[in-house]
Amino acid sequence: MDTIWVPDLSVHAGPRYRAIAEAVARAVAAGELAVGDRLPTHRALADALGVTVGTVTRGYAEAERRGLVSARVGSGTYVRSPQDGSGQGFSVAPAAEDGDIDFGLAFPVPMGRTPALADALRDLAGDDAALAECLGYHPEAGLPRHRTELARWLRGWGYGIDAGHSLICLGALHGLNMALQAVARPGETVASAGLVYPGMIAAARGLGLRHLPLASDGEGVQPGALEAACRQHAVRAVYLTPDQNNPTAEVIPGHRRDELLAVAGRHDVAVIEDAVHLVAAAERPSALVDRAPERVIHITGVSKVLAGGLRVGLVQAPPRWFDDVAQALRGNCWMAPPLNAEAACRWIDSGAADELARRQREEIAARQALVAEHFQGLAFAAQPYGFNVWLHLPEPWRADEFARACAAEGVRLKTGEPFAVGRHPVPQAVRLAISAPAARERVAEGLARVRRVLERGPGRGGATL
């Protein structure tokens, strides 16, 4: 709701803009500002405090950087909180209460991983030479036999991975950080879809990079938007998830992949391809790395098929950036733990990884069929192999209100807010990660609850001024 809030800045030291951010934090902690409250307009607060509009703008931006508020284009600045019942942060939430259903984070389907890992570890325990090798220091790229095995497995998925140009990292997000560090320096510009994986937003922010949102349509990032950004700014890299955008589930078709690569080539922009959601070759166009290996840094990992806890990823970089990625990795952690990669490789070599991938693909298809059944007549986007569903809300629903209503019914999901780059417009839509619940029946129950909330409609409480 709207609120008239005029803080006392005299109790806060330092620049006025920072005092505004501190006042927001104090008011939220004291309960003077509640989640969902809209802060005064920049002009109204500037007039009330006797400061410039620019000071308020900087203050609100600082509060947004701290995660206290979120700015929505054409709507205003609203209080947010990681403790919001809708769970809009992207840390791992506490386990769901009995009866609650968590569609919040896109984890792999819980199925049969413990016995397979136990077998791999028992096999390793009997191999003294491998154990000794895993306990030592090695070059930052990782053990050659690990890179060879991972590259072989990924080629089975249809990705043209070259072990000689690859480095093992601590999962795909770590690889993304290393790639950004290799191609851009603090203050330089990178770009992505306006709604994008929150890890990319956090990585760009943490490295001090300027992050530009690019317009998308049903076929992903628009080449014209990338062209315009490159002409107006010195874009160093563009981040793409061509097989399934997170959260919108858009897939970039083959012709557009070529168009985006052509734009990147004209402006000498690095293309970072995130393929952590492994998709079989028969279900997608060929990967960016296979179309332009000289320009694409390809990132993937085992988290979405084997287990996130292994923290095993792979970065393939062209020769021009390989040494920079290696230096970034060495400076960050020296090397990824060989023990983790050894466990993953034994899991793969035994055939258990492929069997697990097959079973998970079947289960995801069954869950997506449930989505089609429960959301019949609604506007949503999803892929048959996808962990996520992007549900567009009908009028008069607002996404934050819908998320809270679902939370009250015991269902966690995400609005578009955590995925928005800067002040990119956030649509009235929500993302459901249907992979996370342990049982298919729980998915069906969760979808039914979401449908009931949607059809019931929002509450009729009015705003107070």
Image (tube, grey):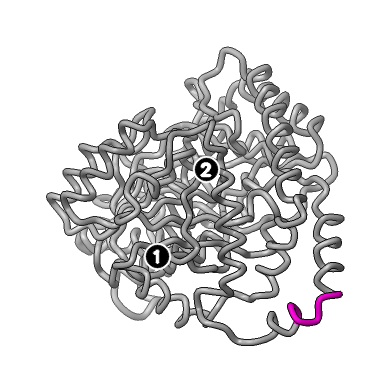
Task: Read off the residue under disc 2.
Answer: 158
Inspect this view and state whether residue 368 appears: yes
- Taking the spot 46% from the left edge, 66% from the top edge, the residue there is 164
Inspect this view and state whether residue 74 appears: no
Q: Position of residue 366 (x, y in %)?
A: 72, 27
Label 1 is placed on what type of residue?
Ala
Q: Position of residue 307 (x, y in %)?
A: 70, 56
- Taking the spot 79% from the left edge, 32% from the top edge, the residue there is 440
Report the disc number at residue 47: none
- Taking the spot 77% from the left edge, 46% from the top edge, the residue there is 110
Dot 1: what SS?
A: helix
Q: Indicate the quadrant where residue 362 lies.
A: top right
Q: Is residue 176 left or right of residue 142?
A: left
| Crowd tier of the residue under label 2, counting other residues whose Cα lies within 10 Å: few below 14, some 14–19, many 20 or above | some
Q: Indicate the quadrant where residue 210 lies.
A: bottom left
- Above or below 291: residue 63: below
Furthest-top residue in view? 377
Q: Position of residue 465 (x, y in %)?
A: 42, 40
Q: Which of these two is toward me, 317 or 379? A: 317
Label 2 is placed on what type of residue?
Gly
- Taking the spot 28% from the left edge, 52% from the top edge, the residue there is 212
